Amino acid sequence: MGGRPAGALAEEFGTPLVAYCERTVLAAAHAYLGAAPGALVLYGVKAFANVALLRLLAGEGLGADVSTLGELEYGLRAGVPGERLVVHGNNKSDDELRAAVEAGVRFVVLDALDEVERAAAAGVERVLVRVTPGIEADTHPAIRTAHHGSKFGLPPDQALEAIAAARNAGFEVAGLHLHIGSQLLDTQAARTSVDWLGGFAAECSQELGWAPEVVDLGGGLGIDYAEGDHAPAIADFVTTLLQRLEQAWTLHGLTRPQVILEPGRSLVGRAGVTLYRVGVDRLRQALRVRRRPDRERFATRAAARRSAGRSRNRRLHPRDGLELQRRPAARGSAGRRRPGPPDPPTREHRRRSSPRRDKRLVSLRVMLSSFWVASTKPGAALVRGRGWLPWQGRGWFLAPRDRGPEAGMYCPEGH
């Protein structure tokens, strides 16, 4: 990582160890800054809250998107100036609002109607209003944030109401905030949301005589986790959004706003690893071998079944790799062969027919025929009860009248 062996890091700092590659983080930060010149790029602290990481990004001109008192404290300790701090949260407390004012943050994002009054009481001056467009991003349902019924942001009608209320309360309502979800692997939902936002901004201009000067497009760009994932490059993703924003604002005759971006996962997700020291090798433990009296070593029965997937009475020999050999039979003290415990039948064995099973069925048919013939003879008695042998359940016995059931014929109940 960064030119240093992972083993050397583990020896120096111990394990478990969370390590981030500075080169990878800076490359991602420069990609955002290069693709969106003039935009305010904020690191989403919830991706990984770390003072050293925030200090590194602040040195490159990035700010921080925070949503708790703890995340705000991280940003302040890392030296992020208030002008590059934006406070979010769909359940902000009064303490968090007051802390935002004391830190001199650039914006507080209003996420609910009742926040207008509480933010005014805390002394907040500059705000953005988060709006929910009702767009379902193609990502996991738990990290969608712009669909109908989302707990984040305000539906369009309530957003208009919040903008009007905030302006009447004396706030400087600078613009709109929009975030549709995380781990986005294409640009379709993001482009749709920007188109929708342009129409909503035009509606604000018509109904309120107000147009956003700032548009916070949030973050959401994903990274590759699985083999089939193909996340867009940072430059391609940002360029597509900015071009779409330019088209939407031009279409509605609006002045192009200042843009804020809030990447998190795409900034640091590729850079981090966690190092652990292996304590127990479960695979080797499963394939452990034991020494026999003849000093030959054989793998255990369970390992032979899992590794070979073949007949159950064969064993792996370490010297022959995966070649299978038959295990020598165990012998007793007198030299007699002592068979081992039988293996349980598999499902396939149960399904297959066997000669023994077929023989039992034939015997049952013969017995039933004999039973029917014998029942027609005089002096026979038909008795119902439980058999005297272990395998006999309740059934019928056909026997001479002067003797017990054990002298007669048995037929299982139901036949």
Image (cartoon, rainbow, N blue to C red):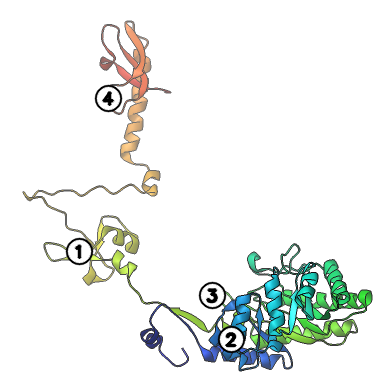
Furthest residue toward left: 334
Q: Residues within 10 Å of mark 1 (few under 14, many from 20)?
A: few
Q: Amino acid at mark 4?
A: Leu
Residue depth check, mark 1 versus mark 2: number of the one nearer the observer = 2
Do callouts 4 and 1 mark residues in contact (Cβ within 8 Å)?
A: no
Residue depth check, mark 3 versus mark 1: number of the one nearer the observer = 1
Q: Amino acid at mark 3?
A: Glu
Of marks 2 and 4, which one's residue comes earlier in the chain?
Answer: 2
Q: Residues within 10 Å of mark 2 (few under 14, many from 20)?
A: some
The residue to which callout 3 is attached is 227
Mark 4–mark 1 distance (CA, rounded to whole Å): 44 Å
Mark 1–mark 2 distance (CA, rounded to whole Å): 58 Å
Secondary structure of residue under mark 1:
strand
Q: Amino acid at mark 1?
A: Arg
Mark 3–mark 1 distance (CA, rounded to whole Å): 39 Å
For residue 277, above or below residue 347: below
- The circle drawn on residue 389 is 4
Residue depth check, mark 3 versus mark 2: number of the one nearer the observer = 2
The quarter of the displayed image where residue 317 is located: bottom left
The residue to which callout 1 is attached is 290
Secondary structure of residue under mark 2:
helix
Q: Position of residue 313 (x, y in %)?
A: 26, 55
